[in-house]
Amino acid sequence: MTFRFLQGVFCALVFAATSSAQGAGNQNQTAPPVSYTSISELNQLLANLEQTSMQLQQDLNNLRVDRWKTDSGTKHQNQSDVESIRKNLQFALPGIINDLKNAPESTPLTFKLYRNLDALYDVLSSVVESTGAFGNKDEFRALDQDLGSLEASRRAFADRMDKIATAKENEIGQLRTALQSARAEIPPKKVVVDDTEPSPKKKSTTHKKGSTKPAPKPAAGDSQQGQPQ
């Protein structure tokens, strides 16, 4: 294997490790293809959830909290909860579903949908309990059935989220193994040392001594004057 292949495996490993942490804003980037089975499963889950949402909105419209035989505080609280559920079903939930359709195996979006369903279930269960205590039997029976359908969707998306996370973890493990194998197959770089190459000559640090000029010879007349008469 070449170094380019090793580099490609490493980049794929980094991409797989960071893709699960990316938000919806990064979903326009190129992603690996999703299997038909996974898309088919998601479409069925979303279809069931959308049907539950439509039925629940209809049953909430038929709910008459103002006729309950209870104090005004309890009525006000339940009316506020019903309005919150309506807003979520009409605005928040459709947006999350649409985003998930565009990124079927996005772990952050799947968790976002599960968390939204979990919040809806908690509020709706309180409304259903109050309806059973203060409302009529038909209202309670309808809402209780909607609560069961919502719980089924919540569990289904929890299972899907676990399945996606496990698949991504296995994919990262396979890429990490491939990276280690690629590293092991790359031969070490050899360094050749040529001992026959002569060592560079050192520059001489000694300086030549300046030559001394010979003393001038005395003139002939001067030497005769110096001799005794």
Image: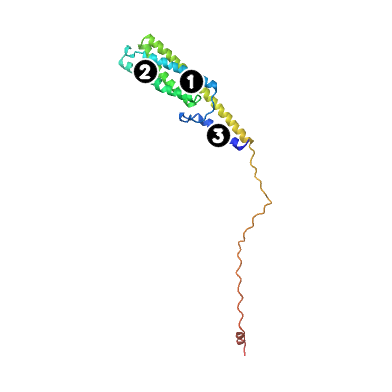
Disc 2 versus disc 1: distance between alpha carbons?
Answer: 24 Å
Viewer-closest of 67 and 101: 101
Q: How many marks?
A: 3
Give the left or right position of residue 155, taking residue 70 as reference: right
- The numbered mark, 3 or 2, whose residue comes first in the sequence reads 3
Label 1: how many residues lie within 10 Å, few (<14), some (14-19) or many (20+)?
many
Residue plotted at (59% across, 37% down):
4
| One can see residue 96 in this view | yes
Q: Quadrant of the C terminus?
A: bottom right
Q: Percent from the top left, x then y, of residue 73?
A: 31, 17
Residue position for label 1: 157
Q: CA distance from mark 3 to mark 1?
A: 30 Å
Q: Quadrant of the N terminus?
A: top right
Mark yes or no: residue 128 visible. no
x and y percent of residue 154 in the render? 46, 19
Q: Decide: is 169 above or below 129.
A: below
Q: Amino acid at mark 2?
A: Val
The image shows residue 103 at horizontal and vertical percentages of: 49, 25
Tell me which label, 3 or 1, sits earlier in the chain: 3
Marks 3 and 2: which is nearer the front?
3
Q: Is residue 128 left or right of residue 208?
A: left
Residue 50 falls left or right of residue 184: left
Classify residue 93 by image quadrant: top left
Element marked by disc 1: helix
Q: Are marks 3 and 1 in contact (CB under 8 Å)?
A: no
User: Does label 2 or label 1 sit earlier along the sequence?
Assistant: 2
Disc 2 packing (10 Å; few <14; some 14–19; many ≥20): many
Residue 18, percent from left and from top: 51, 31
Q: Residue furthest right?
A: 196
Disc on res. 11: 3
